[in-house]
Image (spheres, rainbow, N blue to C red):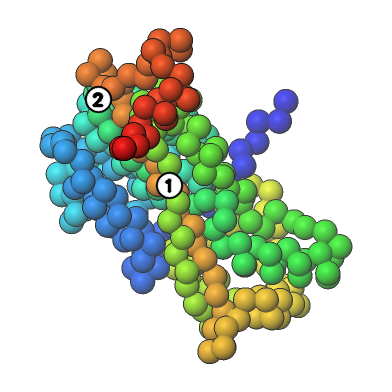
Amino acid sequence: MNTKNLFDTKVKLTKRARALKKGMFLQDLVRDEILERIEGVNREFKSTAVVTGFPQVWKQALPVATLVPDDEILRLTPHSFDLVIHALGLHHSNDPVGQVIQSRQALRPDGLFMAACFGDQNLLELRNAMAAAETELYGGLSPRVAPMAQIRDLGSFLQRAGLALPVADALKIPTKYNDLFHLMRDLRYMGETNIMTDRTKSFTGRSLLECAQKKFESRYSDADGKVNCTFELIFLSGWAPDDTQPKPLKPGSATKTLYQAINDARPKPSY
C-alpha cells in the first residue's frame, strides 16, 4: 500500500521560512475577517488557540492566545479551549479532516472552531493558463498545482469531526497583476508555492512560463493591461456539541405538512 504523503512537510517549512512580511496580506485578511466574525458571536472566549504557520500574524491581535504550528499532529491539549482557530493551513495538510478532528478534541463543550483555507476556485486563472501551456508544449500535465477541496467537501469535514451547527462560506478576492511572473513572485513571498511530494524537482523551463504568460494575458487581461486573478477563501465554523445547543426535530415529529404550514402563513383575504 502506498502511504506517501501528498505534501512534503519539510519543503513547506523551508518555503514558509523564506516568506516575507509583504507577502502576508492574505494572512492578515484572514486574521481580520475571523476576528470580525468572532466579535459578532455573543460569547466571551477566555481560552483561545490559533493553529498557524505564521504566528507573527496573530501575536499582536491575540497576545494571550496559545499559538501552535500546523504540524500533522497538533500540539493542543484536549478539552482546554473555548475557541480554536485554524488559520489558512488546511489546504496544505496531508490529513485536513484529522486537523479538524484534533481541533475539535481541543475544545471544551460548546467551544467554537473557526478555520480559513483556500478553495478549489483559488487562482483558477493561473491554473488554467499553466495547464494549457503545459498541454501545448508537452502533451500532458505534471503535478504543479495542489488539489483543493470544494466548499461542500470542506463543510462535510466539520460534520465528520463531530462539530455541531456547521457553516461554510466562500469569499472571493479579485486581484490585478502585471503578469504571471508578478503573481508567482507574490506566491513565493506568501510561502505558497508548490510543495507536493511528486512535484517536478527541476526548474520550470522558461519556454513553459512564457507560453503560460501569453495564455494568461490573452484570456484574463483587462483594458488597463493588467491581468485579473482571483483568490478564493473558504471560512468554516462549528461548535463542540453541548446539551444547551438547539437540536433539530426528530424525523416524523412534525404536526403539520409543509403545504399546511405554507397555507397557514399566507395572508387571509378580507371581504
Label placed on residue 169 = 1
Q: Amino acid at mark 2?
A: Asp
Mark count:
2
Residue 243 place in picture, x, y as percent: 25, 15
The residue that appears at 62% across and 67% down in the rendered structure is 126
Q: Is residue 127 left or right of residue 60?
A: right
Residue, x 62% and y 76% (percent of image)?
A: 220
Q: Residue at x 50, y 39 (%)?
A: 154
Binning the other alpha carbons within 10 Å of mark 2 as few (below 14), some (14 to 19) or many (20 upward) gives some
Residue placed at 49% from the left, 62% from the top?
231
Q: Quadrant of the N terminus?
A: top right
Q: Tell me, yes or no, if residue 69 can be seen here.
A: no
The label on residue 213 is none
In this rendered view, identify the residue nearer to me: 24 or 199.
24
Q: Nearer the viewer, residue 67 or 221?
A: 221
The outermost residue toward the front is 271
Pointer 2 and pointer 1: residues touching (CB < 8 Å)?
A: no
Which mark's residue is nearer the viewer, 2 or 1? 1
Residue pointed to by mark 2 = 110
Q: Is residue 120 visible?
A: yes
